[in-house]
Amino acid sequence: MRIDAERVFSAHDHAACRRATLERAEEIVAAEGLRLTPVRRRTLEILLESHQALGAYEVLDRLVASGFARQPPVAYRALDFLVDHGLVHRIRRLNAFAACMRPGEPHRPAFLICDTCQAVAEAPGTGVADAMLAAAGAVGFEIERMSLEAVGRCPACREARA
């Protein structure tokens, strides 16, 4: 299931969105011979509750509220696992994490971050990434890691300000 930026920034059946993404994540992990432990699964569920990025300590607080012990290393290990397997993205600008809305699909997302409501959407970033790679290659620079992030206002927040 593909969730586009336009959909994130508009009214949609978020329960179906969350359910489909979690089901796809379970398929991916099972296909890799791994499993979503209770803390990994709950961490992913927390990140799927909204289209917002959460910091590691926000995730930890919600894990504790769900009955897990307050153990920061456990939360960080769960987040690392989810990032390593393409189920969660790290949003560097926010020092936070957001559930991947296209798990299992090869993609280079550009993150659109609303500075008013804090919504985060994945937009296709292949063209921008390719341009960065070309620019870097032209001067002999080798990119090891790239994060495409833009901060602005989503349509709903722009409309509310008008």
Image: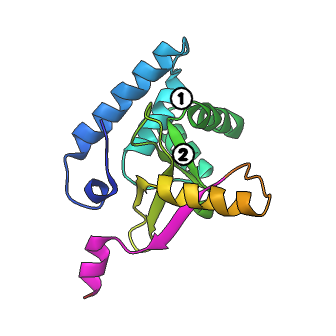
On residue 89, the disc is 2
In percent of width and height, residue 62 lies at: 50, 44
In percent of width and height, residue 73 lies at: 71, 36
| Residue drawn at (42%, 27%) of the image | 25
Which residues are drawn in magenta? 146-161
Q: Earlier in the sequence, mark 1 or mark 2?
A: 1
| Residue 130 drawn above or below residue 81 | below
Q: Amino acid at mark 2?
A: His
Task: Assess whether residue 159 is covered by the magenta stretch.
Answer: yes
* Front position in the image: 93 or 36: 93
| Residue drawn at (53%, 29%) of the image | 40
Residue underneath mark 1:
40
Residue that extends furthest to the bottom in the rendered view of this protein:
162
Element type where label 1 sits in the image = helix
Decide if residue 96 is on the left or right side of residue 42.
right
Residue that extends furthest to the front in the rendered view of this protein:
138
- In 3D space, how far apart are the residues under numbered discs 1 and 2 (Cα atoms)? 14 Å
Decide if residue 103 is on the left or right side of residue 70.
left
Of the 4 image quadrants, the one containing the N terminus is top left
Residue that extends furthest to the top in the rendered view of this protein:
33
| Residue drawn at (58%, 54%) of the image | 96
* Front position in the image: 8 or 53: 8
Element type where label 2 sits in the image = strand
In percent of width and height, residue 32 lies at: 54, 15
